[in-house]
Each structure stands twice: as structure tokens, then as C-alpha cells.
Image (spheres, grey):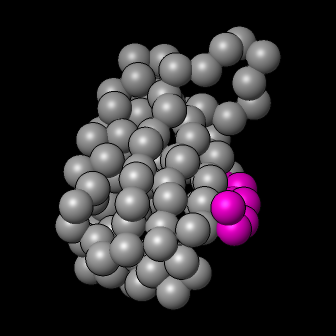
Amino acid sequence: MVKHIILWQLKDEYSQEEKARIKQEIKTGLEGLRGRIPGLIDIQVQTECLPSSNADLMLDSTFEDESALKGYAVHPEHVKVADGRVRPHTKTRMCLDFEV
């Protein structure tokens, strides 16, 4: 199995209310991919962070293998969420992929 972990920071110009709405939209969009992407075993988005955090939200997803992760990256359902709900609102992205 392969884990795919992403940390994002939202753009600075958003108010706390806007950030809360955006985080929920990202969570709903990404978690809505469950059962729709071949090889995607699990997907969760964490939106509630402690004040000590320097990221606004985290994607924690698990794939059958590296090939499934590569397929997810270009799958039209994922691209739609990434381009429509994630990328327009984020200023930084960090990724860690690893085998488990």
C-alpha cells in the first residue's frame, strides 16, 4: 500500500469564516472521491488544527500501490476537485508519499 499525505496552507487574504467554508468544501470534495477512484482505499481530510499548526488542512489517503496513486493524480474526478476547490484557494502544498 501507498500513503499520500498533503498539507496545505490557504491564501492569506481569506477571513477565518472564509477559511472555514473553503476547508469544508475541500473536505467534502476530496472525501467524496471515496469509492470513485480505482485503487483508492481510504481518503480523509483533517480541517481542525491545533494553534501550534502551520498548515490549515491535511489530506491523508491510502492507495493499493504506486500505480493507483498515479492514476488518482490524473483521474478526471480528482482533477475536477483539485482544480475547482483546492488549487484556487491554497498558497502552499507539501506532499509526502511512502509505502506502508
Q: Quadrant of residue 97?
A: bottom right
Query: Which secondary structure class fits the magenta region best?
Result: strand
Q: Which residues are magenta?
A: 93-100
Q: In this rendering, would 6 be left or right of 62?
A: right
In the image, what residue occupies the spot 34% across and 32% down?
A: 24
Give percent across and percent down for residue 19: 45, 28
In the image, what residue occupies the spot 71% across and 66% down?
A: 98
Give percent across and percent down for residue 3: 60, 60
Q: Look at the picture and state if 45 lies above or below 73.
A: above
Residue 43 in view of the camera: yes
Give percent across and percent down for residue 9: 63, 41
In the image, what residue occupies the spot 59% across and 61% down?
A: 4
Q: Quadrant of the N terminus?
A: bottom right
In the image, what residue occupies the spot 45% across and 40% down?
A: 45
Tell me, yes or no, whether the highlighted magenta stretch contains residue 18: no
Q: Quadrant of the C terminus?
A: bottom right
Residue 29 in view of the camera: no
Which of 6/65 is in front?
Answer: 65
Please tell me how many numbered marks the rendered image carries.
0
Q: Look at the picture and state if 30 lies above or below 66.
A: above
Give percent across and percent down for residue 57: 56, 36
Q: Look at the picture and state if 56 lies above or below 16.
A: below
